């Protein structure tokens, strides 16, 4: 029998050392355990519970308090309510073009086909979207989407989605375990058998015995200094899956959203929704020039307005007019802002000016963008109905993530599934705004289906081995027992500086290599990190545990970025400008090996011809349904 020494985690007072028998650990059993209570996790759990499986969700924070609740602009689905020319094929085409054709074809197909059904389902479950004059779900314009496609609730769409899912989920008999952080997956003969977690409040460990795990832990933006992400996004799902032997895909593609707040410094990085540009906002440099007209890529030239007059016609609703260049994909707009700043034409605090005040009346702005109005009023003392906002790129989203089968969402580990932002493959080299919320629902449901199928076909029983449990606990407890280790907050800061400076919006081989070297040093610091105290209410310990996932996430991004010697989508290499033909034919896969982390190129299969026909078709063909799929 193993006995571990750990700090007194149950009592008040000075931390002491007590014996703990692993058999004392609280144990909870579920058929399926969902890790993460954002949109993807809750939607997956609903599917499992509705089919009668004993389902549990654990969440690092509170139910519904996830990235999904922060989503502002909307959810993309080709409902065709505002422009009847829209259909799933054009949504699919836009997604593939936005992803620079590196998306998993099947995932993009399923997503475009099933998103409308998932949005209507949400409405049936009680979501109240903004309406058109005809009483249909309203849809707004967003970057890279050919037609108004984003169902929304002002700029608080995520709140409505999570509220609806949460209300629905609590009536399905799902057990929710809040403020419970997953540490590591337990395997039995290579298959999922459980997960070890701890309660954040007490520091006590809890063993979840389960036949399948659905990872839905979101991204890892907290590896960067300037980010729109909140404290929860430390790449935990990526870390846990990687340590268990799952592969990661497309990690080099990290999205820098073009419009984060740049001033005051305390709020730098907080998101300014793309809805501002979707509703008519324009970008100006310090000389008052609407600079996006100078940055229209060849691929999008035929579908983008090239004069201010045409862009103005589009805003007035002229269906023949082309979209303004401010609605080009995020990678293009983010790089353009960076270039303007570098050329000395940046705003006072090093960004660009986003102006909606001169395009829309104040009551429209307050109605459609209420959160933005309050955000700038409260945080920057700016009235956006009168003045422009200062904005600049902020790390926002992970296109890459855990590699899954496109239909079942299963990883290469039997019983381990992933969906939502922590899964990779759907968005290729760049995600279109609004495509995450629809991704969560489509693939949340499919992950639920996949896990149900897997669990129902299991014939053997599973065992969580005591030595594996003990190893995870020892790793966690060592941090509490160490007196002289590094301060986890300072190590996190060092990591963020490294990622910000070496693995930023534009990259070079030299910077990436030196970043990788620094990450190696940080890895050693993380091994020696200390949060000397009780496990109870110990945020330093929580932070130290998160670092184990942040470092895996950061190393994976850096290694993949080194290997991709071209510029594509969100990955820009100054030493390898432009897309290379070869780059279209592989995805980068990250694997755990005995020698450490390995990044390798994985050849892409040729797309099914019917999907290639759609992706490369002209709009006229698709609008007229000439291409049959
Ligand atoms: C400010 C902002 C605005 C956005 N606006 C839009 C938009 O308008 N449209 C759009 O499509 N997308 C938008 N996005 C992106 C989108 O919101 C996210 O990609 C999406 O919500 C991710 O959902 P998810 O379910 O995968 O994860 P999340 O919603 O991020 O949820 C992750 C869950 O995992 C839990 N978790 C994490 N680690 C652990 C662990 N170790 N143990 C237990 N639980 C854990 C967290 O507590 C949380 O419950 C926005 C993002 C931000 C930050």
Image (tube, helix red, strand yellow):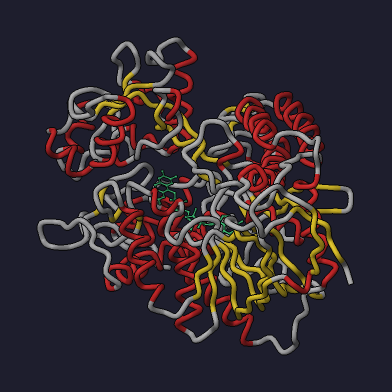
Image coordinates of residue 44 in percent, x first then y, are 49, 70
- What residue sits 43% from the left and 24% below the top? 337
Q: Residue furthest front?
A: 13
160 with respect to 114 (left or right): left
Which residue is at the front of the view, 194 or 586? 194
Examine the rendering and report whether any part of residue 297 can be seen. no
Residue 377, above or below 467: above
Residue 255, above or below 613: above
Q: Quadrant of the C terminus?
A: bottom left
Residue 366, above or below 415: above
- What residue sits 49% from the left and 14% below the top? 342
Which residue is at the front of the view, 360 or 626? 360
Residue 422's quadrant in the figure?
bottom right
Image coordinates of residue 371 in percent, x first then y, are 28, 41
211 with respect to 110 (left or right): right
- What residue sits 59% from the left and 31% below the top? 572
């Amino acid at each position: 029998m193993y006995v571990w020494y750990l700090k007194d985690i149950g009592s008040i007072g000075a931390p002491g050392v007590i014996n703990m028998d692993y058999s004392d650990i609280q144990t909870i059993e579920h058929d399926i355990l969902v890790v993460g209570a954002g949109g993807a996790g809750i939607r997956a759990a609903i599917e499992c519970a509705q089919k009668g499986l004993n389902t549990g969700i654990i969440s690092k924070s509170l139910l519904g308090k996830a990235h999904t609740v922060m989503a502002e602009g909307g959810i993309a689905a080709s409902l065709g309510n505002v422009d009847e020319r829209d259909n799933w094929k054009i949504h699919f085409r836009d997604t593939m073009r936005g992803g620079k054709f590196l998306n998993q074809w099947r995932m993009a197909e399923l997503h475009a086909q099933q998103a409308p059904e998932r949005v209507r389902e949400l409405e049936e479950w009680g979501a109240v979207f903004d309406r058109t004059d005809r009483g249909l779900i309203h849809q707004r314009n967003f970057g890279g989407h050919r037609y108004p496609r984003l169902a929304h609730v002002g700029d608080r769409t995520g709140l409505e989605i999570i509220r609806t899912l949460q209300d629905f989920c609590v009536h399905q008999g799902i057990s929710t375990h809040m403020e419970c952080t997953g540490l590591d997956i337990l395997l039995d003969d290579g298959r999922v058998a459980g997960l070890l977690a701890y309660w954040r409040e007490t520091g006590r460990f809890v063993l979840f015995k389960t036949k399948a795990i659905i990872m839905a832990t979101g991204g890892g933006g907290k590896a960067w200094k300037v980010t729109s992400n909140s404290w929860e996004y430390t790449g935990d799902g990526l870390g846990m899956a990687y340590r268990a032997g799952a592969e990661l895909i497309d990690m080099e593609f990290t999205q820098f959203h073009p419009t984060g707040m740049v001033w005051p410094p305390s709020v730098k990085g907080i998101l300014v929704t793309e809805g501002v540009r979707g509703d008519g906002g324009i970008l100006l440099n310090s000389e008052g020039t609407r600079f996006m007209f100078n940055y229209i890529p060849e691929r999008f030239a035929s579908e983008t307005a090239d004069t201010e007059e045409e862009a103005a016609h589009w805003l007035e609703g002229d269906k023949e007019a082309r979209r303004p260049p401010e609605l080009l994909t995020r990678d293009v707009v983010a790089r353009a802002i960076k270039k303007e700043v570098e050329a000395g034409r940046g705003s006072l605090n090093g960004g660009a000016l986003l102006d909606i005040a001169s395009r829309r009346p104040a009551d429209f702005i307050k109605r459609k963008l209420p959160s933005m109005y309050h955000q700038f009023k409260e945080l920057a003392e700016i009235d956006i109905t009168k003045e422009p906002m200062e904005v600049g790129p902020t790390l926002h989203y992970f296109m890459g993530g855990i590699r899954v089968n496109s239909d079942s969402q299963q990883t290469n580990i039997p019983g381990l599934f992933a969906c939502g932002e922590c899964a990779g493959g759907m968005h290729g080299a760049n995600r279109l705004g609004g495509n995450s919320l629809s991704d969560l629902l489509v693939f949340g449901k499919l992950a639920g289906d996949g896990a149900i199928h897997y669990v129902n076909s299991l014939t053997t029983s599973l065992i969580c081995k005591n030595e594996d449990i003990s190893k995870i606990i020892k790793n966690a407890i060592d941090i509490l027992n160490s007196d002289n280790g590094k301060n986890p907050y300072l190590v996190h800061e060092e990591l963020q500086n490294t990622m910000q400076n070496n693995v930023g919006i534009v990259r070079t081989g030299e910077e990436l290599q030196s970043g990788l070297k620094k990450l190696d040093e940080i890895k050693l610091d993380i091994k020696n990190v200390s949060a000397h105290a009780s496990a109870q209410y110990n945020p330093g310990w929580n932070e130290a545990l998160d670092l184990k996932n942040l470092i895996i996430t950061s190393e994976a991004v850096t290694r993949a970025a080194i290997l991709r010697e071209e510029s594509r989508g969100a990955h820009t290499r100054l030493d390898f400008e432009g897309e290379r033909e070869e780059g279209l034919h592989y995805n980068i896969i990250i694997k755990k090996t005995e020698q450490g982390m390995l990044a390798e190129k994985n050849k892409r299969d040729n797309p099914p011809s019917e999907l290639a026909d759609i992706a490369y078709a002209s709009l006229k063909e698709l609008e007229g349904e000439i291409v049959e799929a």
